Every structure is written in C-alpha cells, then in structure tokens.
Image (cartoon, helix red, strand yellow):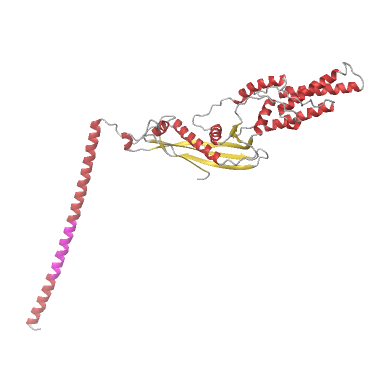
Amino acid sequence: MPSFIRIGVYLIALTLCNITTAHAEDDNTELAKETARIAAETALINAQAAQRNAEAALVKAKVDAWGLPSYSGETELGSGAGVIEATILATAAANAAGRYIAATAPQLTGGKIGYLVLAGDEGVNFSQLAIIRVQLDGLRVAFQNAGVPDPDLAGTSRLAPGMAIAAVSAVSGLFRAETSVTGVEINGISDRTLATATSGALSSSFLASAPTIPRDEAFVSGKLWMDQAVLQRIDTLSGMRQQAIDLRKTLGEKPVGANAAKATQLDSVVARFDSAMSKFLSPDDKGTIPAAEAARVERLGSRIGSILRVYVDKAGGSIVNTKNISTIFGVDPVKISGGLIASYIYTDPNDGSVKKSGVLVCRTTLTALRHIQESGRKATNKTAKSVSVACSESL
C-alpha cells in the first residue's frame, strides 16, 4: 500500500477516536451537573425542615412562657357526664315524634270529637261497663218478673242519696288511683312522655289516666231504659227496689200459699240488688269504685273516635369527644346527640281495626354541651343555637 494512503487511514482513525473521547467527556459533565443539582435540592429541603422545627420550637417556647396548659390530646368525662344533656335532646326527639304522630291521625267521623291516647300498655277497662250493664239488665228483668214495674219516669229526679255518697267516694278514689307519680331513670324517656307530647299536638285528645269528677245524672222525662246512662239505670233500679219493699210489706210478715212464694221472690230480688250494689259502689284495692269508673268510661266512649297507643321502644344518645388543639382556646370538645325509636297505632274503638300505624326514628344533630345549656336562653343569648330534630319512618 502506498505510503500516502496509510497516512490517510491513520489520520481518519485518529479523528474518529478524538470525536468519541469528546462525547464521553460531555456525558460525564452532564452527570456531574445533575448530581450536584440533586445534592443542592436535598440540602435545601433539609434546611427548610430545620427552619420549621426551629419555628415550632420557638412557638412552643412562647406558649410555655405564657403559662398556657399543655395539650395532651385528651378530654376526660367524669362519671355520668352528659347524661342530662342527652336526656334533654331525647326529650326534644320525643316532642318531635309526638308532632309527627299527631299529624298522621285518621279523620274522626260519626260526631266523635277526640282521640284517646294510651301510654304503652296502659289499659282502659271498657269491658267493665259492658259487664255492669248486663248485670243491671238482669236485675231489671228480675224486678219485672217479681211484679215490680219500671218507676214512673214522667218527672225529673236526681240520683238517690246512696249514689250521691258513692259519687263523693268516687272522686277521692279516682284521684288516689289515677294521679300517682312513677319515678323514671333520668336518662330514660317513657311511654308517658311520648303520650303527653302527642296529646298536646292533637286537636282534641283524652288521657285514660286523667282524673275526672263524676257528675250527677238527671233523668229526662220519658227517657227509656235503653237510653239511660249506667248511673241512671242504677237509680231506676233503686226505685224498683223501693217498690219491691213496699209490695213485700203488703203481703204480711208470714204470708202463706201464693203470697209466700211471691214474698220469697221479692226478698230474693232485693237481696240480689243489694249484693250487686255492694260490689258496684265499694272501692277496690286501688280506691276505684266500679260504678263510677263505668260511668267515666261510658262518657269517654261517647266522645272517642279513635284510640291511639304509643310506645317508646328505645331512647338514648351518643357522646362524641373531639380531640384537637382548638379546644385549648375555648372550642367545646364534647358533642352529644339524642334520639329515640317510637311506635304508634291508631285503632277503631268499635271493632279494634287498625287505621294507621308506624315505627318512627327521631334523631337530633350533634350539639355541643354549651349549646344545649344555652338553647333555653335564646331570648337573652344571641349566640345560643337551636337543636335540629328529624323524624322519619325509615332511615
């Protein structure tokens, strides 16, 4: 190979080598620059973190210098704390439930004016009225069979003296039996609470436990037996008893033959009447006189168009304890909610058919302790907040 060719090849190879070396040096320079940049950013981040720590230490030093309490992130509640506040909220829920139940009341018909509200399993003994009526009907038939007619109803009379005494006893008996106060747990909302709240929201309502004063029953001229009230029937039978006694006297002390049989029949019906009246007019172990109670139920039944029974199935509340530093500066850490589950049922007093029923869930919003205490002073404290309550028959 000619020498000038070898020299050319050598020069080309040398040039290529120099180009490769230059590229390698450029790559190393870029890598070094990137490494330096990352190291600088890391140092900056570390410096900023150190600065924040220093600032936090400065704030802590200032707080310590002010003598403020240290924050541990805990708020302790003593035994029983929040119970009365939860009860207040549950009471608000009971009032809301009462308004809801009253709003669902079925329409009254037949000239009836009100609803009978029963708390839980509270009962009204309507059957006692029916039993007394049946017994009075039987006594009337027994007097008639003994030849004693119904008394003359042409005039107007008042109750017999014995019934007046019974009425006085009935007043004290009803108050003794039906105005007793039962203690409840302070954190419990009772069926009575809901019954009271509901009756207040109804247009017209009656409470079975309300004490009543028996009234005199006056006869109306020509009033038939079937149209008489139970006390009027007792008075009618009292007149028949007196007629039976007068008739018995006409038969002599020792009648014979047919008169003896008649005397026995008269004596028997009078004794039967006296025995029945002894039961009807004597207070039971609760101080209630059956005849007076039957008369009260009779008057009640003539006005009741629907019977409402309400239950509080469950009532209570929840306490939420929030932990953050804002509580040091006056934010209330404890919030409370209240609620209840209630059920209700409207029935027809004539046949017991269900007209409307449901199960309610009523709940309040979470409310700070101080707001619960201030809610009753909204007129003088503009910062007080009202408690929101929601009721529904589903979640």
- Spot the residue most to the left: 4
Asked whether, in this view, residue 330 is left or right of residue 22, the answer is: right
Q: Nearer the viewer, residue 40 or 15?
A: 40
> Residue 70 in the image: x percent, y percent?
29, 33
Residue beneath the point at 20% across and 43% down: 51
Q: Is residue 85 visible?
A: yes
| Residue 60 among magenta residues | no
Please provide percent x and percent y for residue 361. 51, 41
* Dominant secondary structure of the residues highlighted in magenta in the image: helix
Counting from the top left corner in percent of width and height, residue 334 is at 39, 35
Q: Is residue 295 left or right of residue 362?
A: right
> Of 255 and 182, which appears nearest the observer?
255
Residue extending farthest bottom: 2
Residue stretch in magenta? 19-35
Left or right: where 94 falls relative to 235: left
**In front of the other: 295 or 29:** 295
The x and y percentages for residue 244 are 82, 22
- Residue that extends furthest to the top in the rendered view of this protein: 253
Q: How many marks?
A: 0
User: Does any portion of residue 119 appear in the rendered image?
Assistant: no
